[in-house]
Amino acid sequence: MPPTRILATVGAALAALLCTVAAAPAEPLQASASCKGAACNGKDPISAGCDQDGRLVESVPLATDRSIKVELFHSSACQSNWARSVGAPNGGAVLVTNKRGARYVRNTDGARRYVWTPMVDGTVQAQACLGPQNSDALTCTRYH
């Protein structure tokens, strides 16, 4: 087969492939959520698939060590919130609460970098906090 014929064949195949890709509709990535709203209370955001579209709502550093943070996350697909601590030392607790009274706490003992809580219903406002275990001295996000 002459080189020009090979180039024409390859070019036609490439053009057909590009047309197929260009014609495919771009769909947003959707979380494969296994729960929604109050049904997510107490569930792990990762095993429930809610982390797939989870977004950081607010991050607040501790006043005493700005490398340690408490963060509030929200999943639209799951309609849920959870808290995460970043770099918290042993002896700490990270918690998430919502305005319906749902509350989940995880201690930070043995954590490497991140500790996250189970989820709360995100159809109402929620807040994330971090502080020493069994203490009211907490650093918190606002309610969102």
Image: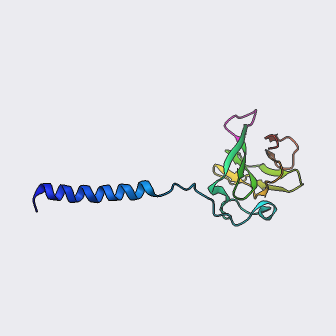
Q: Residue at x 79, y 65 (%)?
A: 39
Quadrant housing residue 28: bottom right
Q: Residue at x 10, y 59 (%)?
A: 2
State the residue in front, 35 or 116: 35
Picture coordinates of residue 46, whole percent (x, y):
66, 60
Picture coordinates of residue 135, whole percent (x, y):
87, 45
Q: Residue at x 23, y 58 (%)?
A: 10
Above or below, 136 against 110 in this view is above
Q: Is residue 136 magenta?
A: no
Q: Residue at x 12, y 56 (%)?
A: 3
Residue placed furthest toward the left: 2
Colouring used for the render? rainbow
Picture coordinates of residue 1, whole percent (x, y):
11, 63
Q: Is residue 82 left or right of residue 17?
A: right
Q: Quadrant of the C terminus?
A: top right
The boundaries of the magenta stretch are: 61-69
Picture coordinates of residue 99, whole percent (x, y):
88, 50
Quadrant housing residue 131: top right
State the residue in front, 87 or 19: 19
Q: Is residue 67 magenta?
A: yes
